[in-house]
Image (cartoon, coloured by chain):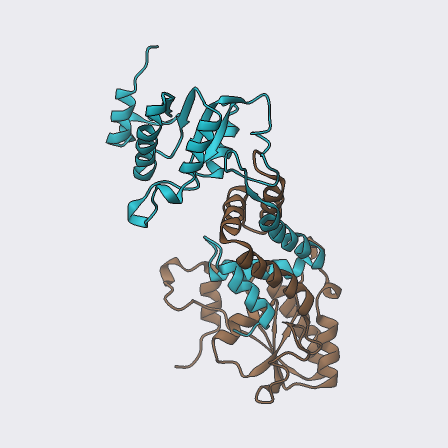
Chain colours: A brown, B cyan
Amino acid sequence: MAVADPIARLVKELARLPGIGEKTAQRLAFHILEQGAERAGALAEAITGVVRDVRCCSVCQTLTDRDPCAICADPKRDPRLVCVVESVPDLVAVERTHEFRGRYHVLHGALSPLDGVGPSDLKIRELLLRLEREPADEVVVATNPDVEGEATALYLKKLLSPSGVRVTRIAQGLPMGGDLEYADQVTLARALSGRREL
Amino acid sequence: MAVADPIARLVKELARLPGIGEKTAQRLAFHILEQGAERAGALAEAITGVVRDVRCCSVCQTLTDRDPCAICADPKRDPRLVCVVESVPDLVAVERTHEFRGRYHVLHGALSPLDGVGPSDLKIRELLLRLEREPADEVVVATNPDVEGEATALYLKKLLSPSGVRVTRIAQGLPMGGDLEYADQVTLARALSGRREL
């Protein structure tokens, strides 16, 4: 490449990010250069700051800069209702509904034997210890409705049932604005079996 | 948002980059967090390094970490043949052809009265001073074949002609693999008027 070494190095670093190819990385690098030292400094500081200041909440394992996190420290959130999610973006998605007033537990993944992800790679032990320490009435398993998420949900059900806690699963069915004609068989079958009184 | 402040700040900084929306910025932020301190440090250092170490070459105005840049310092490159480009990525594109053995001059933009970009906003004065200092036999104007690039080419032609230097323009016509049926009128007209002996 006919560009200066520092530019080539930045392009290489940016191209490591997911969904960013060589071409986009080059465009971003020149944009960062054009914006000047102040904006570039703010971006670099935000990157170093995030890995320096963010850790897992000791209660719910979400990523946070204080421990316990804002949700675990909020006395208005019901500690006897725990929603289990795969990742922090999933937690953010549930929060956006403004429908859930309990607390969370982030697994940081889902069971996937093919990818070598077993129970010990997830924050499952932390969930068990937490529920021993602070028993809950209900655990809502909100893992993704895919093979890994379903397997994780069943595994958690088997693990938590002996303790007598109610283990529930978020509903599966047609999404809002969906169309029966174009729904896949599994989704439609789940929507039928999950039907409720009107 | 239900994410920690350092994450929210990083998402905001990333979302300022061109072509990166809120959603992509969030995905990138969590990826950077997951990758850990070492990779994040390398990225942050590459960003601060690029604005710290890169400046304009005093000869050709390309972005470089040494002055003069590698191309201007290369005795094998013909100093009497100067290719004028709008931007550093354009210079990289010409270099990739391995067809050009002269030197470059980067304008850092093109004339665009509507956007308030006049001759004094481009490195045109630097080009004139340079050609006075080191006269060239030919200046190849390789600005983009769009309204701004064409206007810039014509302006340079008028400016440089009195000095007796040969001013040429890169050819316009059908791109390789193109199709006459789907070519726009202007491109096809230029391809016709620019026809050459076989």
B45 or A160, which lies in front? B45
* Residue placed most toward the observer, B188 or A126: B188
- For the C terminus of chain A, the image quarter is bottom left
The residue drawn where x is 69% and y is 86% is: A135
Position of residue A70 measured from the top left corner of the image (x, y, whole percent): 61, 80
Name the residue located 55 percent from the left edge and 67 percent from the top edge.
B9
Task: Tell me if A163 is positioned left or right of B136 in this view.
Answer: right
User: Which residue appears at 53% of the width and 59% of the height?
Assistant: B14
Task: Give x and y (percent) for residue B84.
Answer: 43, 31
Relative image position of residue B135 (x, y in whole percent): 46, 23
- Closer-to-camera residue (B104/A11): B104
User: Can you say whether A175 is above or below A163 in the image?
Assistant: above
Judged from this view, the residue extending furthest toward the top is: B198
Residue B71 location, quadrant: top right
**Which image quarter: residue B10?**
bottom right
Q: Where B120 falls versus A80 (above or below)?
A: above
Task: Please report the residue visible at 73 percent of the width from the left and 74 percent of the height from the top.
Answer: A126
> Where residue A187 sits in the image (x, y, percent)?
47, 63
Could you tell whether A111 is left or right of B177 in the image?
A: right
Q: A126 left or right of B162?
A: right
- Residue A194 visible in image: yes
Placement of A10 over or under A107, stated as above or below: above
Relative depth, front residue between A169 and A61: A61
Which quarter of the figure is the N terminus of chain A placed in? top right
